[in-house]
Image (cartoon, rainbow, N blue to C red):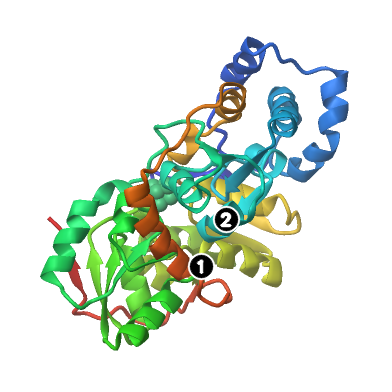
Amino acid sequence: MARIIDHALASKSAPGCAPVSVLGATGAAAARGLAWDAAVEAETRGLYEKVAHVVTPAEWRLHAPLIAAINRLKRQKGAVILAHNYMTAEIFHCVGDFRGDSLQLAREAARTDAPVIVQAGVHFMAETSKILSPDKTVLIPDMRAGCSLAASITGADVRLIRQRHPGIPIVTYVNTSADVKAESDICCTSSNAVQVVETITREWGVDTCIMLPDEYLARNVAAQTGVRVIAWHGKCEVHERFSAEDIAELRAAHPGVVVLAHPECPPEVVQAADFSGSTAALQTWVGDHRPARVVLLTECSMSDNVAAGHDDVEFVRPCNLCPHMKRITLEAIHDALVHGRHEVIVPEDIRVPAKRAIDAMLALPPAAPGRFDPARPVPADLEVIGP
Ligand code: SF4
């Protein structure tokens, strides 16, 4: 497991995988005329209590001036911050107004009355917010915050797939660009993927669907349903790095550890885990079961964010960071609010059909967060397409 940093082994008191060095954070706040003082300490004391389990006092003195400034700017500008579970703890818990996975944030984007939305997540998430809220200003703090899944496929690819597979519904994971969603019949998240696949094939009266672009999610969904799934060859560069061998090593190093895996992991990882589910399902499982010791095989910050509310649970942290999510920092959020940058625009000829695919997903009745039974095998003949 050489490529994974195990914080639990490295140091009991190690904080989460903060993407900014201590020196960098000091300079970042000072460069913006912000500093730690008694007023900032008093203003942010209640927020620190939320993250004290995973953020050290020294780190907090660096983050707090930016956090205080961001929360003031939000009030001045009528802005809300949508914070994805993979944000670092100080962003997720201390400046996020709405927190959750892709599906939860998409629903909040559609509901909020705020004129400005700052997406503390990656670019496809900001596009989704703009698609659902065209009259609002949607900002992403760093335009380089991409995604390996979103980059694996284009709208032109989807048009070609439809030509080659007429009459088969196309289900697209929300981790895609707006032009890919625009060519799709319905979107899904890891929370509702099984429900979406079963609903759309029933409505179309077919036994097959195409599921884009995450090959592993498609394989794991196929294991949970009788629907025949055709997959695309995209991968999440974070989750694909976990292996069944990693799980064996974690179990040996941390006796009794409960292993939870996200379904973007390879199927052999899901099968070797004790439980598999969407981001929301993993969080719910920890809250419901309160295991003595647990490891979440997903993006590194997710463990910190769940750990912040469960100080009775020991989290083993094999740290796979998403480099795209980590481009979103407190400094970038601060500057996005100050300068009104970077505005996300989706042309109407893409936005309208993309919204149709998202709305088809949002119209489904709410269901419990998706759970994947590790005991169910992936069909051996599953077809994977792609260039
Ligand atoms: S964690 Fe994976 S799916 Fe999520 S943004 Fe990063 S690369 Fe994309």
Question: Residue 195 sits in which quadrant?
Answer: bottom left
Secondary element at tag 2: helix
Residue found 69% across the figure and 29% down from its top: 70
- Residue depicted at 84% across the width and 39% down the height: 46
- Image coordinates of residue 80 in percent, x first then y, are 66, 41
Residue at the (34%, 55%) spot, across then down? 240
Q: Is 111 above or below relative to 300?
A: below
- On screen, residue 112 versus residue 87, left or right, reads right
- The dot on residue 110 is 2
Q: Is residue 244 left or right of residue 162?
A: right
Mark 1 within 8 Å of ligand 1, using the beta carbon: no
Q: Give the structural element (helix, strand or loop) at label 1.
A: helix
Give how far across and how far down residue 153 sits, in percent: 24, 52
Question: What number of labels is visible?
Answer: 2
Q: Amino acid at mark 1?
A: Leu
Near-viewer residue (97 or 183): 183
* Residue 252 can be seen in this image: yes
Q: Are marks 1 and 2 in contact (CB under 8 Å)?
A: yes
Q: Residues within 10 Å of mark 1 (few under 14, many from 20)?
A: some
Residue 161 placement (x, y as % from top left) = 17, 64
Which of these two is toward me, 133 or 188?
Answer: 133
Disc ID at residue 206? none
Q: Amino acid at mark 2?
A: Ala
When the figure is inspected, residue 194 is found, relative to residue 97, above or below; the finding is below
| Nearer-N-terminus badge (1/2) | 2
**Residues at marks 1 and 2, CA–CA distance in whole angstroms:** 10 Å
Which quadrant: the C terminus? Answer: bottom left
Say whether mark 2 is within 8 Å of ligand 1: no
- Residue named by callout 1: 362
Q: Is residue 175 left or right of residue 96?
A: left
The answer to whether any part of residue 149 appears in the image is: no
Circle 2 packing at 10 Å, graded few (<14), some (14-19), many (20+), is: some
